[in-house]
Each structure stands twice: as C-alpha cells, then as structure tokens.
Amino acid sequence: MSAGGANEGRERVLGNIRRALHRGPLDEAQQALVNRRLNEHPRGPVPARGQLDAEGRLDLFQQMAEEVSATVDRLDAWTDIPAAVAAYLRKHNMPSALAMAPHPDLTGLQWAWKMPTLVVTEGPAQGHTAVGLSRAFAGVAETGTLVLRSGADSPTTVNFLPDTHIVAVRAEEIAGGFEEVWERLRASLNGRSVPRTVNLITGPSRTADIEQTLQLGAHGPRKLHILVVTNDDGG
C-alpha cells in the first residue's frame, strides 16, 4: 500500500471512531495534551509494594512468581547458570537438551566446557523443543512478571514453544513496577525502533476455560523456572 493509501485508510478508521464517539477532530488544546503525554511519558500511580528497596523487590518478585506456579532459584554468579540449568533438568528427569536464545550473556558461558553433557542449540525453538532458555530484559516485583524483548538475540519462539521455559535475569534488573521497566526500555533503544514484541510473562501458561478448572500449559510452557543472579560478577 502506498503512503497516500495508508494515510487515507488511517483517516477513515479515525473518522469512524470519532463518529461513534460523537466527537469531531481534536481541538488545539486536546492535541497539545495528547502530544505532551506521548512525548513526556508521565508515570501513573505506583502501589506501595512497587516502591521497595532492592532486597524487598527481590523477595516480593520471588513470592509473586511462586504464587502463580513458577519456580525460582537464586544464584550467586552469572557463571553459575549452566550448572543450575543442568541441575534443574536432572531434578525433573528432563532431556539434557535445550534451545537457547543467542543472547551474548548466555552464549558466552562456555557451555561445552562447563556442562559437556548438555546439548545446547542456539537460536529459535522448534515444535519439538522440550526446554528453552531465555535472557529477560527485566522483572517486575509487583506481579512476579518477566519482561522479554523480541529480537535476533531473543527469539520469541523460545518463550512459548517449549514445554519448559527457563529464564535468566539479574536481581538489579527487577523493578518495583511496570512504569520503571517502560522507562528503562525506552532509554535502551538509543534512537532505534521499539522491538516487534515485548512479552510479559507471569507464571506458566494457563487457562480455566474448561469447566473452570485451571490447566497449566494450555497455550505455552507448562513449567517456568527463573534463575535470578544476585551478584553482578560482570558475566
């Protein structure tokens, strides 16, 4: 579609919305208000539980994540991740193979040397992939939510296709509320366009559509395991 055609389509859609709301185009004051909101990104109210110190945020994040059936391991160092992944797979009698997002924080962990028994495939997950490992952009203590950006080093398929999803995040990346995460995301762009998707993951996939009975793994992973690295070891 040409630029002109796209603009015409946009105006038709907006015109239909205005007519449904019985409202004409924005006047100068209304347009100024919209522009200010888009440019300044004002924060909404943040609940008290989203305004904790670092230790409080970490404790609340783990509490909220576990309340929605995720599991959490706290690691002392980023370099402990390969051993923690292998231990989790052994504990749950899972295959020693996983699809790993090709994020440099993960690919630089010398998997073949540290855990030679693991078969690690870098890149997107496939339909048969049993375990996926991702690098989170952030966590949200208020709800126990993980925030993952899509991109070449963070394929969205790793987040949703495997039956088990393992996610690594640093403790200092856990924010109190969503407002801080959006500010951090905008600051990280450095003039680049926003990611195609930003996935907010709170616990394993679930539904209660069938007879109001909670079922895990309905639309994605059945298990969510979070590795929180509590010390910044530069890894």
Image (spheres, grey):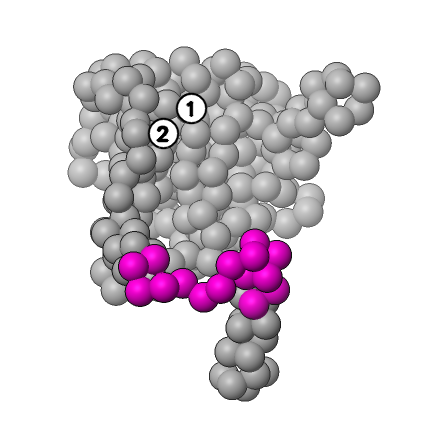
Q: Which residues are magenta?
A: 15-30
Q: Secondary structure at mark 1?
A: loop
Q: Residues within 10 Å of mark 1 (few under 14, many from 20)?
A: many
As rendered, which of 200 and 42 lies closer to the eye? Answer: 42
Q: Is residue 66 magenta?
A: no
Work out which quarter of the rendered image holds the N terminus and state it: bottom right
Q: Position of residue 167 (x, y in %)?
A: 44, 34
The label on residue 143 is 1
In the picture provided, is 132 more to the left or to the right than 116? Answer: right
In the picture provided, is 21 more to the left or to the right than 188? Answer: right
In the picture provided, is 234 more to the left or to the right than 132? Answer: left
Q: Are marks 1 and 2 in contact (CB under 8 Å)?
A: yes
Identify residue for label 2: 140
Q: Residues within 10 Å of mark 2 (few under 14, many from 20)?
A: many
Residue name at image x 32 percent, y 44 percent: 182
Residue name at image x 50 percent, y 29 percent: 202
Q: Amino acid at mark 2?
A: Val
Q: Position of residue 76 (x, y in %)?
A: 26, 22
Q: Secondary structure at mark 2?
A: strand
Q: Residue 54 is drawn in which quadrant?
A: top left
Work out which quarter of the rendered image holds the C terminus and state it: top left
